[in-house]
Amino acid sequence: GIQVEQSPPDLILQEGANSTLRCNFSDSVNNLQWFHQNPWGQLINLFYIPSGTKQNGRLSATTVATERYSLLYISSSQTTDSGVYFCAVDPDGDSWGKLQFGAGTQVVVTP
Amino acid sequence: KAGVTQTPRYLIKTRGQQVTLSCSPISGHRSVSWYQQTPGQGLQFLFEYFSETQRNKGNFPGRFSGRQFSNSRSEMNVSTLELGDSALYLCASSSKTFGTDPYEQYFGPGTRLTVT
């Protein structure tokens, strides 16, 4: 099956710093999403980005489907950015609602 | 538009009991997927329903089952609970209808199940 690898596993940032999270996947996908899981467990949609570049405020994401990776950029980080960031892909292209998740990147933003 | 809702939010059960969790999708979404999240295994897909039919299933034992109603609300049931079933159970909905539809999944707040 498809492998989804996220790096780094952990990231500690000082407030105001910028960072890049990476998601590598081992096969072609037709769906890629980035999520932020808050301390209460809720998965919050950040981007639906099977290809191309998107921006939403201080966050942006780029997926290069031909090279099988996606990047999530956090600029001017804030303490509210703390949490776990997940990348998830549709492993089959015709998988009827199944997302394969990476192990996540735990982000801690310190004041 | 209201988001995905799940009930109950927290549940404590004893080994051997069974449990039923409920999920109401975003209005208009007919696809509902269920996931289990544990510290050791991460987020794992359980099953997906569309129009009251299970279309996809993950690698879980038969003790895990689900169903979907005509209003797209879904329930999942775990019978003969084991300690290892303690987890956060997440439900997601999407507007996906056909296999090749592009889609975005939206998640509910989850049900945290503790088995003692």
Image: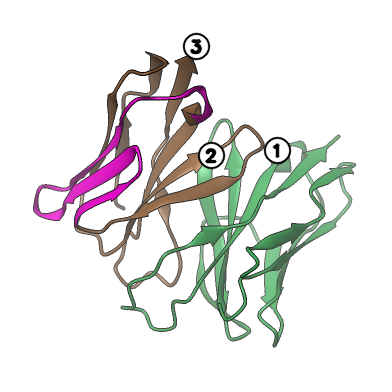
Q: Nearer the viewer, residue B114 or A41?
A: A41
Mark 2 sits on what residue?
Answer: A37
Q: CA distance from mark 3 to mark 2?
A: 20 Å
Q: Residue A1, image x and y in percent? A: 31, 53
Answer with left or right where residue B99 lies relative to residue B35: left
Q: For the residues tagged 3 and 1, is the chain the same?
A: no
Instruction: Give A97 or A2, whichever is nearer the viewer.
Output: A97
For badge 3, the amino acid type reads Pro
Q: Report whether residue B35 is seen.
A: yes
Instruction: Please state which amino acid type lies under the numbered disc 2.
Output: Gln
Q: What is the distance, in whole Å, between disc 3 and disc 1 at their CAs? A: 37 Å
Dots 1 and 2: beta carbons under 8 Å?
no
User: Does the residue at mark 3 contact the one at mark 1 (Cβ under 8 Å)?
Assistant: no
Q: Residues within 10 Å of mark 1 (few under 14, many from 20)?
A: few
Above or below for B116 versus B94 = above
Instruction: Give SS at disc 3.
Output: loop
The shade of chain A is brown
Colour displayed for chain B in the image of the structure: green
Residue A22 is situated, as x and y percent measured from the top left of the image, at 26, 34
Q: Mark 1: which amino acid?
A: Gly
Question: Residue placed at 42% from the left, 40% from the top?
Answer: A86
* Residue B63 visible, this angle: no
- Camera-nearest label, 3 or 2: 3
As drawn, A84 above or below A89: above
Question: Mark 1 highlights which residue?
Answer: B84
Q: Position of residue B81 (x, y in %)?
A: 80, 48
Mark 2 lies on a secondary structure that is strand
Label 2 resides on the chain identified as: A
Residue ID at (63%, 84%): B52
- The magenta stretch spans which residues? A52-80
Residue situated in front as seen by the camera: B12 or B29: B29
